[in-house]
């Protein structure tokens, strides 16, 4: 895919829906990072989306992005080596976080909010801790702290469900992101159909090399010593489904308990790793209320 290169200063959001948002690129130390931007123009703090294992631009649920972009500037991007972005994907979460910061600064932003899903939530935690002046508020979904229980099992679980998807001719996200109930299967189908709404200028799928690097980074994160979450002083909203198999839901409760300024969304019922997609209306409303809340005295 070829994408036009933008200037290093922010460009106005120009689309009312994610499925039609143009794909742009910005040069970050000689490497092109692709992104899509939408939402109201203005000087408000933009919301940067940090996505999950294997995900590219087309894997964000358009209902979530469009809902947030109704009132916020929203920017989704492919980090280094992912999708149509250039370079090689790092094999540590910390290096991915540094690349994300370089991307944000290449767009000229001095302060942002972050929404991190799964692996993106790992990255968001590092950015919030290491760049406190850059990050105003954080939303963490389907994620957990370094050393969290079960995170080191993501590689085996993912590969097993990819094989299951191949053998059953079904998208592995049916198994990885949703519960195996009638309701869960119905919601998985609806989500996967939404991902098809964009029919032109679609992103490249992640390469096998980048996939391996991401798996290694997640495995390392899961084996690390427990993180000192007291370093994260920003307000944080924490959300997940009650039956997350990829990053077990107990990690969500742990995050909420250990982060100094956290708010916990009650775990979504009969929902897994893709809980914020399954309950997109509820999640968008809660996330917007959190992001727009006035600072406490």
Image (tube, grey):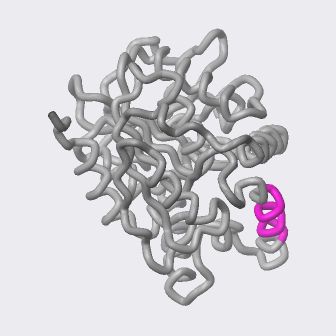
Q: Which residues are the magenta region?
A: 155-163
Residue 22 seen in render: no
Percent position of residue 55, x then y: 63, 48
Percent position of residue 106, x then y: 49, 15
Point 49% across, 54% down: residue: 141
Percent position of residue 294, x then y: 16, 38
**255 or 12, which is in the foreground?**
255
Magenta: main secondary structure: helix
Q: Is residue 64 left or right of residue 255?
A: left
The quadrant the N terminus occupies is top right
Verify whether residue 156 appears in magenta.
Answer: yes
The quadrant the C terminus occupies is top left
- State whether residue 77 is above or below residue 280: above
- State whether residue 184 is above or below residue 67: below
Which residue is most to the bottom?
A: 182
Residue 192 seen in render: yes
Verify whether residue 234 appears in magenta.
Answer: no
Point 60% across, 47% down: residue: 145
- State whether residue 188 is above or below residue 295: below
Point 68% across, 58% down: residue: 149
Point 50% across, 85% down: residue: 183
**170 or 174, which is in the foreground?**
174
């Amino acid at each position: 895919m070829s994408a036009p290169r933008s200037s290093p200063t922010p460009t106005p959001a120009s689309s009312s829906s994610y499925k039609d948002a143009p794909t742009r690129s910005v040069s970050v130390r000689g490497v092109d990072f692709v992104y899509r931007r939408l939402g109201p123009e203005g000087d408000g703090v933009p919301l940067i989306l940090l996505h999950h294992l294997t995900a590219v631009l087309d894997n964000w649920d358009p209902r979530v992005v469009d809902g947030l972009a109704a009132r916020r500037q929203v920017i989704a991007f492919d980090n280094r080596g992912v999708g149509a972005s250039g370079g090689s994907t790092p094999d540590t979460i910390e290096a991915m976080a540094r690349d994300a910061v370089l991307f944000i600064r290449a767009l000229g932003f001095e302060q942002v909010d972050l929404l991190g899903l799964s692996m993106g939530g790992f990255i968001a935690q590092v950015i919030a801790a290491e760049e406190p002046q850059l990050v105003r508020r954080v939303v963490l979904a389907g994620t957990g702290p370094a050393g969290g229980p079960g995170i080191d099992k993501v590689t085996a679980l993912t590969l097993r469900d990819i094989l299951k998807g191949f053998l059953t001719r079904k998208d592995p996200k049916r198994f990885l992101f949703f519960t195996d109930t009638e309701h869960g299967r119905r919601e998985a189908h609806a989500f996967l159909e939404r991902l098809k709404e964009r029919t032109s200028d679609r992103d490249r799928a992640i390469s096998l090399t980048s996939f391996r690097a991401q798996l290694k980074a997640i495995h390392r994160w899961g084996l690390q010593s427990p993180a000192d979450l007291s370093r994260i002083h920003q307000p944080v909203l924490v959300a997940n489904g009650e039956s997350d198999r990829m990053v077990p839901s107990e990690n969500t409760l742990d995050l909420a308990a250990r982060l100094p300024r956290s708010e916990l969304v009650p775990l979504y019922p009969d929902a897994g790793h893709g809980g914020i997609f399954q309950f997109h209306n509820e999640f968008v409303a809660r996330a917007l209320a959190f992001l727009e809340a006035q600072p406490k005295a």
